[in-house]
Amino acid sequence: MKRYRIRRLRGALLAVTAASGLLLTGCSGAGDGGSNKASDSSRRGHAPAPGGEQQSSPDDSREAAPSPDYLSTFALDVDTASYGYARRTLADGRLPDPSTVRPEEFVNSFRQDYDRPDGNGFTVTVDGARTTEDDWSLVRVGLATRGAGDADDRPPAALTFVIDISGSMGEPGRLDLAKDSLDTMTDQLRDDDSVAIVTFSDEAERVLPMTRLDGHRDDVHDAIDSLEPTDSTNLGAGVETGYETAEDGLRDGATNRVVLISDALANTGDTDSETILERIASERREHGITLFGVGVGSDYGDELMEELADKGDGHTAYVSDEEGARKVFVEQLPRNIDLTARDAKAQVAFDPETVQEFRLIGYDDRRVADDDFRDDSVDGGEVGPGHTVTALYAVRTKEGADGHLATASVRWLDPETRDPHEESGQLETDALDTSVQRASTRFQVTTLAAYFADTLRSTDGDRTSLPGCPSLSELSEQARHLARSTEDEDVSHLADAIGEAQRLRD
């Protein structure tokens, strides 16, 4: 895709480039209104955010970027756990705690139709549509990696499964689901892949050292079948032993990864998240061992699991049923063994001639200093094949604005050579669709997911701070229509979740 140079603002607006990631930081309403305050989780039957301290108010990032700063920079993120946990909570008859709702993870839970590159790296797609509020539009920045391809084309994997077997994991849909999924996944991995298993409750135990699957699949199955829930949750011991096991089984030329399966409710041993986080960060720096966090359970330490994955240059997913487990363990995990980009960051430059203000929806914990966009020593996101990253912005244009609106760039390091690369895309005002309803179907799904997330983060009924946001009843109607027109099961699940939220809010 063609590259564009951006003129400097404030003496020096970096030529925009954006590493493989998605732009989503909370946005505020049209006009000059202040931020909504975070809701009290005890109101309207909100499910509490278990484990540790509450996150800062989800509305903290919703203020407009201060003029004349027209840059927005963030590290790419492909997490989806927040949406999965919200669906589980709504199905249980509770509204999710606003602090656990991350809009970018709602948006990134759905398939997109972006063009894909032939090799490593990204394509950049930028589009948008006007909303029902004067001068306000929603702008979508879409990044896509190459297709997943054949499993034989990826490097071998050395996977260390760190599995929570504390008493809480005995709840249906936790350890039992994990065991069934691991059995299925073991049969689908290649002979040259390796697997190790560590369990933890009040103590950690190495159940299976790093074992090559060729001729040893039965040993892996036996180890999985032996897992039974026991006592409390010493997450720190599990992480420590898991990384020791991964380091002992480290393989050159392979993807070395720890897969943590837990409700992340640490209550025994070292419960200090900083100690656990530092161990994960040091292993990533010294040995390149990354982390994939799989959350389970109706009570779930969402904040801690998110922090663990961020420190481990990995991502998180949430599993609550057989369909979700199959998607995570059988589809996503094998796909994520390969990498197409390291330390990916995105940067969007809005044109001050046409843009009055803008707000990134989500990505609160992934923001990067604008000057660090091209600093390759600053961590970005790790992204594999078959992924898309989407960032949505609320953008207020100047009255009568006409011309260049924004340029989005992504910067990443080649996973093998570590050479930096950049790609860019741009958007003109006349390319904006006249309404969200006239935009492409996938754009409509994107905005629907973002509107729903923003509604769940609000405290004042079914109106939110995103410009042009419909009521919950209108969102539910639109979701049903999109589910029928797309014949997409994931969109049908979204419609069900919106319906549950509407019933709980009424």
Image: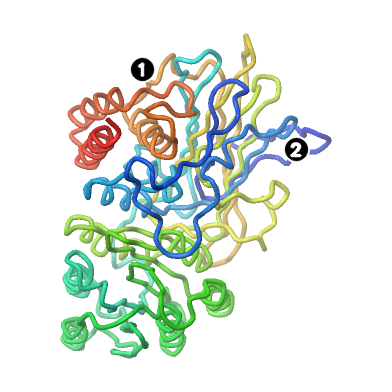
Q: Residue furthest top?
A: 400
Residue 380 at x, y = what percent? 57, 57
- Residue drawn at x 22%, y 47% is 91
Q: Is residue 288 above or below residue 19?
A: below
What's the amino acid at mark 1? Arg
Decide: marks 1, 2 in contact (CB < 8 A)?
Answer: no
What's the amino acid at mark 2? Leu
- Residue drawn at x 29%, y 68% is 152
| Residue that carries the numbered disc 2 in the rendered image | 13
| N-term mark: 1 or 2 | 2
In-front residue for pair 165/137: 165
Residue 362 at x, y = what percent? 50, 42
Left or right position of 150 against 8: left
In-front residue for pair 484/468: 468
| Residue that carries the numbered disc 1 in the rendered image | 438
Q: Residue furthest front?
A: 42
Residue 163 at x, y = what percent? 31, 77
Q: Is residue 251 visible?
A: no
Q: Is residue 283 above or below residue 453?
A: below
Q: Residues within 10 Å of mark 2 (few under 14, many from 20)?
A: some
- Residue drawn at x 29%, y 65% is 151
Q: How many marks?
A: 2
In-front residue for pair 126/495: 495
Q: Secondary structure at mark 1?
A: helix
Left or right position of 395 against 209: right
- Cα separation between marks 1 and 2: 34 Å
**Splitting the image into 4 quarters, where does residue 31 fall?**
top right
Residue 269 at x, y = what percent? 45, 83
Q: Is residue 313 above or below residue 106?
A: below
